[in-house]
Amino acid sequence: MPEGHTLRRLATDLDTAFAGRRVHVGSPQGRFAADAALVDGSLLVGADSAGKHLFVELEHERLVHVHLGLIGSFDVHTGVDEVPPPVGQVRLRIVTTGQGPTAYADLRGATRCDLVGPARRDEVIARLGPDPLRADAEPERAWRRIKASHRPIGDLLMDQAVLAGVGNVYRAEVLFRHRVHPLRPGTTLRVGQWHAIWDDLVVLMAQGVVANRIDTVRPEHTPEAMGREPRQDDHGGEVYVYRRTGQPCLVCGSTVRTEVLAGRNVFWCPRCQPRFRSRALQSSHRPPQGPRT
């Protein structure tokens, strides 16, 4: 599933191509045809994202709410000489009209594409946790949920009601970068650890928007610095543990492990991210002390 940086990048691309211009809105597939007819010829105000949700705003406070789901794509094409016939199941097509460079965008495979108003947009955003890519994010909202929960931190980071926009890649990588085991209970995390994780996500995800891919390795662990081959994976990007099961850790050489957590594979290094053991548990396993003499 696309992570938050993909939606933020998509909002920027839509803004660049269409903001401030009148657009033709259609639904070649037909599933969005009735709503498309209501906004066809409208001025496109702009686009914004919140977590994994995208909102394309048109005049008169009408918004197209999109969630790409697992297989959805929203392809933006700019500077074309002509708009080609739609290919495949295009649920939504946006095309520029009038003077200026020609651009079009095709939405396919999304789990959600609805015409909504501001109240519905606000309702969706209110249900989400803070998004590291939004200037109005309040990380303390997520911290209050995390510190009160016995669920594993690896599960909490993927819960969009706790933290919006983080998916499986950023989850695995940020926990590795901060030496936190994904099964560590949220209640055991220290506030300083949370702030470090949040600050790192803000930087990493912003870099993902610019690069349009996820890179999480530090300079000393890049292929060039280590003299190793670049990662070969359809997800792209240089990472520490994500989808590197059975391969050596780039930092310590230990074998990267994986297991299923809340229905998704989670990845970690057993040496760099040792399992958390509370002081109380450690004390209970210590041999009894003899009497002092």
Image (tube, helix red, strand yellow):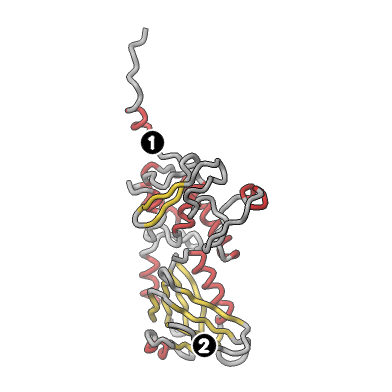
Is 171 placed above or below 127 here?
above
Image position of 289 with respect to 176: above or below: above
Residue 135 x, y percent position in the rendering: 51, 62
Question: Residue 281 at x, y = what percent?
Answer: 34, 32
- Most extreme residue toward the bottom is 98
- Foreground label between 2 and 1: 1
Residue tagged 1: 277
- Taking the spot 39% from the left edge, 49% from the top edge, the residue there is 153
The spot of residue 264 in percent (x, y) is 38, 57
- Residue 286 pos. (x, y %): 35, 24
The residue positioned 33% from the left and 11% from the top of the image is: 291
* Quarter of the figure with the C terminus: top left
Q: Does 279 sit left or right of 84 as displayed?
A: left
Q: What residue type is labelled 1?
A: Arg
Identified by mark 2, the residue type is Val
Please state which of residues 209 and 116 is positioned toward the viewer in this rendering: 209
Relative to residue 201, is residue 164 drawn left or right? Answer: left
Residue found 37% across the figure and 69% down from its top: 124
In the depicted structure, whether residue 63 falls above or below residue 199: below
Residue 230, quarter of the rendered image: bottom right
Image quarter hosting the N terminus: bottom left
Q: Is residue 196 visible?
A: no
**Residue at screen point 55% across, 91% down:** 97
Can you identify the residue that label 2 sits on?
A: 23
Q: For this rendering, which residue is in front, 223 or 122?
A: 223
